[in-house]
Image (cartoon, grey):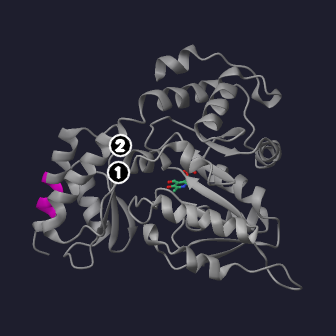
Amino acid sequence: MREAIARAEVGDDAYGEDPTVAALEAEIAELFGHEAALFTPTGSMANQIAVQLLVPPGAELLCDADAHVVSYESGAAAALGGITTRTWPAAGARLDPAVVAGMIRPEGYSAVPTRAIAIEQTHNRAGGAVLPLATLRELRRIADETGVGLHCDGARIWHAHIADGVPLREYGVLFDTLSVCLSKGLGAPVGSVVVASAEKIERARRIRKRMGGGMRQAGVLAAAGRYALRHHVARLAEDHARAARLAEALAPFGVVSGEVRTNIVPLDLSGSALDAPTLSAAARAEGVLISVLGPRAARLVTHLDVDDAGVEHAIAVLTRLLRRPS
Ligand SMILES: Cc1ncc(COP(=O)(O)O)c(C=O)c1O
C-alpha cells in the first residue's frame, strides 16, 4: 500500500484533475451499480453529505437509535443540515421494516415530513450484525411506495458482502445513496466514498466543499483506497474467523452479547466483576486494545493488523482478567 501511495499519479482534484481519485470514484460507483461516486476524507462526512442530499432543512431522517449517523457524528445532521432525526428503538439486524413504515410522516402544514431512512450495514453498535437482504428489499419497497430516500451507511458493507455472500452491486442498487469506508476493515489510512446518481454526486461535490472536504492532490490517498479494494476485501473472512474464535473462547464467561457474524465481538459486562473501563485499562497494559462503549459495554474488533498470534494473546489476557475475582 505504501508503494502504491508513492507511485500514485496525482492532479488537483478541486479541478477534477486527479486521475487516481477519478479512477477510485469510477471503480466504486461501478462496484455498487451507480452512476457516480465522490471521495471524502471521512465516513462521517460521507454520511452527512448523503443525508443532506436526501433531506432538506426542516425535514426528517429516520434511523436506528444506535446508528452511527445519529450517535457519533456530533449532531451534524441537525447542526449542519438543519435536519431532524427520529429513531426507531435499537434493533440491529432484527429490524422490522413494518416499524419503519409506521413512522413515516407525510408532508403537511406544520408537519416534519420524513424524507429519508438510513440503515447501517454492518451495524457497528449491534456488534457487526448483518441486515438480511430481505429486510433491505422490503425497506426499498417501502421507500418507493412512500417516496422517501434510502441511505446505507455502508462503512462496513464489505464485511456484510463477505459474511452473507451478497454481491456489492445487489446491495448498491437498493439504495439512493451509500457511504462506504476504505479506512476501517480495508486498512487504508484515510477515506470514504459517497455513491449515488450523477446528479446527486454533482450536488455532493458542492456540499463537500462547503464542509471543507474538498482536497487537492488527494490521489496519494485514493491510491491507498484502490490498493485496499484489490487486496483487502476477500481477506475479511480471516477477520471474521478470528472474531468467531475470540467469541468462542470468551463464551464461557457469559460476556459475549449477541451472535458474532463479522469482525466485531460485543461484550456485555453486566454480570462480570470488572466494568468496561477497568477491563480495558488492564488489557491495554498487556497490549490488548478494547473500545469502551459504556460502563458495562465494550467491543473487540479484529482487522488486518491482528493475526492468529494476536488473537491467542488477546484470549490469554482476557480470560485471565475475566476469571480474576473482584
Ligand atoms: C458505521 C459507521 N459509520 C460511519 C463511521 C464514521 O467514520 P469516520 O470515523 O471515518 O468518520 C463509523 C466509524 O466508526 C462507523 O462505524
Q: Which residues are magenta?
A: 316-321
Where does residue 173 sit, x and y in percent of width and height?
A: 63, 49
| Residue 307 as seen in the image, left or right of residue 190 | left
The label nearer to you, 2 versus 1, is 1
Alpha-carbon distance for marks 2 and 1? 7 Å
Q: Amino acid at mark 2?
A: His
Does any portion of residue 285 appear in the rendered image?
no
Determine the image quadrant of residue 73: bottom right
Q: What is the magenta segment's predominant secondary structure? A: helix
Does any portion of residue 75 appear in the rendered image?
yes
| Residue 258 as seen in the image, left or right of residue 293 | left
Magenta-drawn stretch contains 58: no
| Residue 324 as seen in the image, left or right of residue 141 | left
Q: Residue at x 67, y 28 (%)?
A: 21
Mark 2 Cα-neighbour bin, 10 Å: few <14, some 14–19, many ≥20 = some
192 vs 292, nearest the viewer = 192
| Rendered image: mark on residue 303 | 2
Mark 1 = which residue? Answer: 263
Determine the image quadrant of residue 152: bottom right
Where does residue 190 sit, x and y in percent of width and height?
A: 55, 37
Where does residue 236 sit, x and y in percent of width and height?
A: 36, 41
Mark 2–mark 1 contact, CB under 8 Å? yes
Q: Residue at x 57, y 66 (%)?
A: 138
76 vs 169, nearest the viewer = 169
Q: Is 7 located above or below residue 292 in the figure?
A: above
